[in-house]
Image: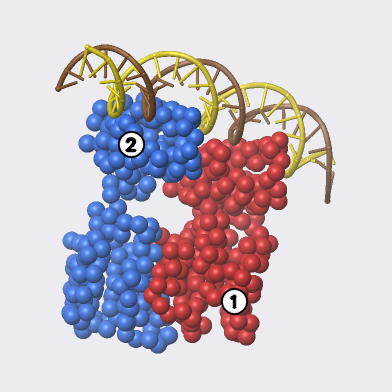
Chain colours: A blue, B red, C brown, D yellow
Amino acid sequence: MATKVLYVEDELFLGKIVQESLESRGFEVQMVDDGAKVMASFDSFLPDICLLDVMLPNRNGYELGADIRQRFPNLPIIFLTAKTQTEDVLKGFTSGGNDYIRKPFSMEELIARIHNLLNLSGQNPGETGSEQNGIIHLGKYEFDLRKYELRFEAQIRKLSHREAELLKILADHRNFTVERKEIMLQIWGDDSFFNSRNLDVYITRLRDYLREDERVQIITLKGVGYQFIVD
Amino acid sequence: MATKVLYVEDELFLGKIVQESLESRGFEVQMVDDGAKVMASFDSFLPDICLLDVMLPNRNGYELGADIRQRFPNLPIIFLTAKTQTEDVLKGFTSGGNDYIRKPFSMEELIARIHNLLNLSGQNPGETGSEQNGIIHLGKYEFDLRKYELRFEAQIRKLSHREAELLKILADHRNFTVERKEIMLQIWGDDSFFNSRNLDVYITRLRDYLREDERVQIITLKGVGYQFIVD
DNA sequence: TTGATTTAAGGTTAATAATGGTTAAAGGCA
DNA sequence: TGCCTTTAACCATTATTAACCTTAAATCAA
């Protein structure tokens, strides 16, 4: 699911540009041009982060920020403003803002700061895939990346480090091809020794662990690599 | 205990002013003027936050930031720099920085941003958090850094020095990987003796102490190190 | 062209080596 | 002495290597 951005901005021209730019990077953006309308849109939109312009008609951006902070103590808020006085920046932080960006700003910087607050890795901006809280769903299985647990119904199987690394790589490429070489490099840092049948051993184990759900399979592409199929 | 700031800056004149200004507000500041000396001062000083100037003799500030991030995944880092290009800001974030301030900056803004990162006022999503007044919250446990106490409901367990050191290192890296080698170096100053199973003994003890809450666990990454998982 | 044969790649399983876990006893130091 | 810390002995788990088996692609002969 795409990351949802609530963007409060009254300069419509600037707003459109920023909105499109964010959308082109995979964010879902709802723009609101009036401070009085903001709180209403929360319950329907449920944003992951807020961008608030400070100079608004009807409603002061700082007040708005404080209200949002009150209702959603953990929602990241970034203030955007043409004001350059230190005093304004301070107001931003004391109103509960998590960052403060001066206009004009570059889109790249805005996105970097959004990522920073959302703890998104620099890789795939809006896209978080079927992974939430470090849990990947694979057919009837759940794979907990942090705890190295592979769960199936009530059973919990602890994976070793190598097993988990391999499964992670396969899952990251699910329904696409991963080259043997790439796996070897990523796990063992070396794809040279042909005598080592190490990877095969772990593939065998994972197949064993995953055989409860036949919609999850590891397919061999001989001479190339593997394809991890998950329906 | 005062908040400890490690401040890396080669312009001594500016550095002095900032240092005094921070100290006058109750921070404890260690200033280092050479990138090459930074890592050495970590073990003795144990800062709560880092301010890094980007332009340094000997060592690039971004590299330094990346190294620090690797060793202390939860330590807030702020880059300070005269560079104004967006590209530099992006580099700062991709090197693991948590904020980026352009010179010249006002002391008030710097302090607001430090507070913001340390959760000294208000909430701060996705940030290091959970440590206040030397107390780290680990699931249902509280770990008092100063008293070396691990508390769970009404029980209080006094930790020994080694136990506390180890738990502190794990907690600083919670939800990230810590290498065995690093732990050994930090506690025993030596990772060479393979015959000593000292670290294992303490890991066993901590696991024992922490088993009341199964959401807190120490996972072994064989051949690599540990991962301290806290939900 | 087509089916048999060769050959390279991968699969499986077991044995071995490396690393970590556990427990208890021996040292050290206030 | 009494509490930590270190050492040691032994056990458990995980990673690697090795041996042997299977399969699929490639080659070759008729």
Q: Secondary structure at mark 2?
A: loop
Residue B157 percent coordinates (x, y): 62, 45
Q: Residue at x 31, y 59 (%)?
A: A125
Residue at image mark 1: B9
Residue B79: percent from left, percent from top? 50, 72
Q: Please tell me whether residue A111 is drawn above or below residue B189 in the rendered image.
A: below
Q: Chain of mark 1?
A: B
User: Which residue occupies 63% across, 38% down?
Assistant: B200
The amino acid marked with disc number 2 is Val
Label 2 packing within 10 angstroms: few (<14), some (14-19), many (20+): few
In the image, C30: left or right of B230? right
Q: Secondary structure at mark 1?
A: loop
- Residue C7 horizontal side relative to residue B103, left or right: left
Amino acid carrying mark 1 in the image: Glu
The front one of B85 and A168 is B85
Q: Which residue is more in the foreground, A71 or B96?
A: B96
Q: Nearer the viewer, residue A193 or A106?
A: A193
Disc 1 crowd, CA 10 A, few/some/many (<14, 14-19, 20+) = many
Q: Can you give x and y, in whole percent of width and height, for residue A18 in the image? A: 24, 73
The answer to which image quadrant residue A221 occupies is top left
Residue B218 image offset from top left, x and y in percent: 52, 42
Can residue B4 be seen from the camera position used here? no
Residue at the spot of label 2: A224
Residue drawn 59% across the image and 84% down it:
B14
Q: Are marks 1 and 2 in contact (CB under 8 Å)?
A: no
The answer to whether A176 is drawn above or below residue A68 in the figure is above
- Which residue is at 47% across, 32% downward? A194
For the residues beneath circles 1 and 2, the answer to whether they share a chain is no
Chain ID at mark 2:
A
